[in-house]
Amino acid sequence: MTEVTVKIDGHDVSVPEGTLVIRAAEEAGIEIPRFCDHPLLAPVGACRQCLVDIPDAGNGRGFPKPQASCTIPVAEGMVVETQNSTAVKAQQGIMEFLLVNHPLDCPVCDKGGECPLQNQAMSHGQGETRFEGTKRTFPKPINLSPNVLLDRERCIVCQRCTRFAAEIPGDPGIALIQRGAQQQIGIAEDKPFSSYFSGNVIQICPVGALTSDDYRFRARPFDLVSTPGVAEHDACGAAVRIDHRRGKVMRRLAGNDPEVNEEWISDKDRFGFRYAVRDRLTSPMVREDGELRPASWLEAVAVAAAGLAGAGSVGVLPGGRLTLEDAKAYATFARDTLRTPHIDFRSRPLSEEETGFLRSRVAGTSVTYADLDAADHVVLAGLEPEDEAGTLFLRLRKANRKGLRITTLSPYASEGSRKLGAEVVLTAPGAEKDALSQVSGVTEASVILVGERLATSPGAYSAAAELADRTGAKLAWVPRRAGDRGAVEADLLPRDGGLDAEAIVRGNLGALLVAGVDPDDTADPAAFLAALDQAGFVVSLEQRITAVTERADVVLPVAAASEKAGTFVTWEGRRRPFTQVFDKPAAYSDAEVLGHITAEFALVDAESAEVADESVEWSPTTTDSAATTTDSAGVRLATWRLMLDNGTLQSGDKALAATARPAFVRISAALHEELGDVVTITGDRGSWTLPAMAAELADNTVWVPTNSFGRGVWADLASPGSTVTIEGAQQ
């Protein structure tokens, strides 16, 4: 790229051609005040605070008036003055205009102490005001959404929020309204600002006009201790900043990590942290005379070790929200201490094909966000990034805006696909194998991203691997949970002779060790709960009271992500270490708890610790979610989880829950016209009556969200891979 040399405040600076003057000044370490400018947003020159004097534009002639440095690209030989009398007068004049109607809310404003307007008024403003009139006021605040509140009199109309909404997530639900002196930020009447990423506008607002309902009037920046962290809600590994006070998280902000999430996070990552304090287990419990009672750690660990040692065959279900360190501890505990091959982290529909795919095509591999930026074509299969991987969605959208071609194999043309500019190949559930074999335009510069939902589509993973091998394209697996990739790296999968998660449930094992598994997430929730009831001994490692702890013989509380240090492994294979935020007594990580049980095993008679794996009888054909038979008389059921739903890690934040998208049954336009706006959908496990919405779907297909109604699809409606029937609801 061609470089040009410019002179800024007497310093020669060489930067790539096309660089904005304000960026060139940054390279030279020269500060220019600004409000509307943001390096990840398109320049707009709205606030005019960054005015500079340009006596020579590189052609021997200068601009007659100061220019906004955030919109002017450099030119060879350009001369820029940011601190001469012309520039200083212009900057002070703009600051004075901005402060004419800005209220003196600083003592109570949430932005106080970290406010660019405060800072720059001191550094680039006048010492005294000449304004003697009455400042403009508005009723306050306005709810742009349940999470985002607007104080209009503070707004300087920099348009950071509107530009973010339109450019980054593609949710232009917030815009400038009215004209002239009355121009302000607003939303459509009776239509809140709806976006999975709305909280970012609060963080980038430079003046405190946008605030969080969750954080408003609750703390000041100088009251808080900040600790860097990693988001635990998906497999993207977004950097976050955890602000806390006296052992309590007050807010979470996006961290700045150009290689991963840049400066953006989802609302789930930003606001979804109250689960760590609701319904928490405070002490170990053991079952006595049919009832759970509190116990000491020494007693509970001893009972757990004795019960597992004497149970015979043991199944280990560690779930998918583990750190890498915890995952390795479970692998060691299962294979070395319990000497059992029956271990599987997958608490969802799965298949034997997926097991082989994860071992041969995922473990030890790496495909990065940078590879997506450099790709000529990205193919998505069994994956809806907007709902299942928020950071990945934003990176794909950014790349698409620069020309990346995206093809998605999906049962219906979703809003997320539209925002990605994706070519949608309508694909019925189970037909992904054939669809992948017919995708065109895949080259060695392409990337194929497959999701965990392909486990229920026979042959799909093999077809994706074949496509990658044939074309030379990179292949990556994008799971939904933060700990899934780390679990693959730790080999928390059944080896030869071992049972997978679904077989463990049906295997009549002597004992079960379960950690962080929600029965309603599994392929057969009723069978899972029945297995807990029938098992001779159940040990639960959990953060809170669940259906598993209620059936366990020993309950051992474990630390939440903020209470331990560890490492998440992202879908890329990137290791994302994080430090401990709170040092709470007796808040042990899973690895530490397993270490205590292992130590107790040394005191147990070796003969009683023998594991009789050979006695387990099971049939692999009954445990493969992808092998479920279907009824040709119905329509195929497609489903995935929305980003915000009834998940247990989202409980406790009412404002966040209020932004969740409502549950709709998506059906074809013809069927919608025939059945009306409310339908009853019936599967082999129950019926739901929900509002219906017409959509562009694959033939003979209906879509519902997995966990936005009742106990979820697998518990209340249908088994994976099955068909359902639809009829108009009784009015």
Image (cartoon, grey):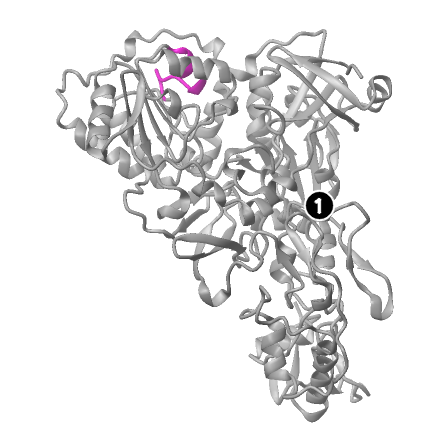
User: Which residue is painted at 55% across and 79% down in the image?
Assistant: 29
Amino acid at pointer 1: Ser
Would residue 139 be counted in the magenta stretch?
A: no
Horizontal relation, residue 70 to residue 382: left or right: right
Considering the image in quadrants, where does the C terminus appear?
Answer: top right
User: Which residue is painted at 34% across and 41% down in the image?
Assistant: 325
Label tally: 1
Q: Residue furthest bottom?
A: 85
Residue 460: x, y in percent? Answer: 59, 23
User: Which residue is painted at 67% across and 63% down in the image?
Assistant: 209
Helix, strand or loop status at disc 1: loop
Q: Nearer the viewer, residue 297 or 323?
A: 297
Considering the image in quadrants, where does the N terminus appear?
Answer: bottom right
Q: Residues within 10 Å of mark 1 (few under 14, many from 20)?
A: some
- The image quarter containing residue 304 is top left
Horizontal relation, residue 251 to residue 588: left or right: right
Q: Say if 728 sits above or below 404 in the image.
A: above
Observer able to see residue 443: no
Residue 496: x, y in percent? Answer: 35, 18
Residue 246: x, y in percent? Answer: 39, 57
Q: Say if 694 sits above or below 326 in the image.
A: above
User: Which residue is painted at 58% across and 76% down in the image?
Assistant: 119
Q: Which residue is mark 1?
A: 194
Residue 516: x, y in percent? Answer: 42, 31
- The image quarter containing residue 39 is bottom right
Q: Say if 349 sits above or below 52 in the image.
A: above
Would residue 502 be counted in the magenta stretch?
A: yes
Write down the region rendered in magenta.
Answer: 495-507
Observer able to see residue 213: yes
